[in-house]
Amino acid sequence: MSEEQPAAPVVSLRERVKSPPAPAMVESYFGPAVAAGIRFQFEPEMRIHMAHAVMLAECGIVGKVDIARILAVLADLQATGVKALTIDYQQEDLYSYIERHIVETLGPETGGRLHTGRSRNDLHTTSWRLVLRGLLLDLLDVVGTIRRTLIDMAQQHVETVMPGYTHSQHAQPISFGYYLLAAADLMERDYGRLSHALACCDRSPLGSGALSTTGFPIDREMTARLLGFSRLVEVGYDGVSIRDDLQEAAGALAVLMTGISRVATDIQTWNTMEFGMLELDDAYSSVSSIMPQKKNPQAMEHVKAVAAMAVGALNMVLAAAKNTALADVNDGVTAGNVPMLDVLERACRALTVFEGAIRTLTVKPDTMRHLAETGFGTATELADIIVREAGMSFRMAHNIVGRVVREAIEAHHTAMDITSADLDAASQALFGHPLGIPVEEVRKALDPAENLKSRTVTGGPAPVRMAEMLDRRRAMLDSDLAGMADIRRRIAEANHTLMEQARRIMDDAGLQTPSQIVRENHGTS
């Protein structure tokens, strides 16, 4: 029988204080912090621990045998998951449980070496950046899909005439494709804002230490590469005290969701019986428990609700930091993480719903065209015809058409009922002479489809211009998606390199499993 081994010394982060956290502190702060760590940080922290351990070994700061033992415990913990940790929610954060697990497995002499040359300050801000980076990449994927759907549908509806609205009133005829292209351009700019936010958070603060880096000769560039970051947050103080990465992401998300909410409002309006221009698919609708006829536009309402959350998250992130010191402080640096990341996750799901709802819309071209023909949106082109054919100033033509429209409405006529004689009568009354505009020119001006064809200037809804613009949007989207694929490839390759280097260090030491580590460290059989 082997001789009984003495219990390993207890290593605690709280030696500075005499008492454990107050129950109220645990319930209000430490417990939720641990829960948030489990939800968001476990995988990122495991990668950070491995990258830091590999760097310590490669730089000769900690012996490779000790690092091999630490890496083996980390590999086993990563494979088993957070359930391997004994979590009672009494410690300050997830890291406390991970360190305790390593020390209990290896003993404090070996297990306690992992934290050499770093602080929880740079560990945590690096972890949150990894989470934010991953969620921004996911969000960019969804926004890219929405852009593709909008462009594809715009292509299908280049000649689907509908009323264009300003101030909720008929303004000028457009096509549904033109409306969708405007939405696609908004999403393109959102993509750019999110990409910039991604670039801001794609920088490694690891190695910043508590705030002034460390006296150990660490290699910050190595850990940045192993974690797939594009560059460093160079100044240590900057690395642990600034959260403009989170703030910029919150701003980009709020702008994105505000624009999406406006589109959702239009879709919701045009889906009503009074408009009847669109119909949401059953799969994106809900029903009433009492009113059998109801088919509610639930998808659009959901998207708008999440948009409100995004605006609230931006407020929270900015307000939390507003009157705090430029330093590592929980209210300014940490408090915004969970609300913001939670909304990012919700936004990804809600935008997936939005894309599906848009893609499966039933568009009703006949209703759209009828509304465009009868709603006087062609009045601008009618005034333009007078300018071109009669040589009058636009303001004079505007007066003539304004009178004709008023008289038509009073007579319960539609725009299509306006005649050349009506224009002559109004011109005679206002300016003392008729216009003599050919009947065919008047009919052409009143045709919404002809209105579209005449808008051939840059950015106009004419089919020829739409084709050109759609081609350019597809090319830009392909370029944007290729750029994101490159970033994902870089991160995947970095993760592969990290695992390979960790495996090589473990293989060189001949250590594979925690049971081997315990035998090596404590001499048990």
Image (spheres, rainbow, N blue to C red):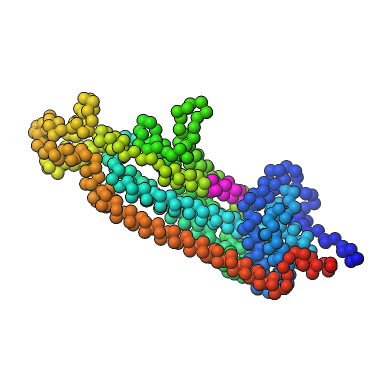
Using residue 513 as the reference point, say whether residue 142 is left or right of it.
Answer: left
Q: Residue at x 77, y 64 (%)?
A: 515
Nearer-the-camera pick, 17 or 352: 352
Quadrant (top left, top right, bottom left, bottom right) of the N terminus = bottom right
Q: Is residue 83 above or below residue 511?
A: above
Q: Is residue 201 above or below residue 363?
A: below
Quadrant (top left, top right, bottom left, bottom right) of the C terminus = bottom right
Q: Residue at x 23, y 38 (%)?
A: 378
Provide residue 367's location: percent of width, then percent of height.
Answer: 31, 35
Which quadrant of the figure has residue 276? Answer: top left
Q: How many marks?
A: 0
Magenta part mainly helix, strand or loop?
Answer: helix
Q: Residue at x 60, y 52 (%)?
A: 333
Asked if one can make out residue 224 in the rendered structure from this viewpoint, the answer is no
Using residue 158 as the reference point, say whether residue 196 is left or right of it.
Answer: right
Provide residue 67's location: percent of width, then percent of height.
Answer: 71, 69
Provide residue 163's location: percent of width, then percent of height.
Answer: 30, 38
Give yes or no for residue 20 being in the magenta stretch: no
Q: Residue at x 47, y 60 (%)?
A: 484
- Magenta range is 334-346
Which quadrant of the figure has residue 207? Answer: bottom right
Q: Is residue 305 above or below residue 131?
A: above
Nearer-the-camera pick, 324 or 249: 249
Q: Is residue 349 above or below residue 79?
A: above
Provide residue 229's location: percent of width, then percent of height.
Answer: 55, 63
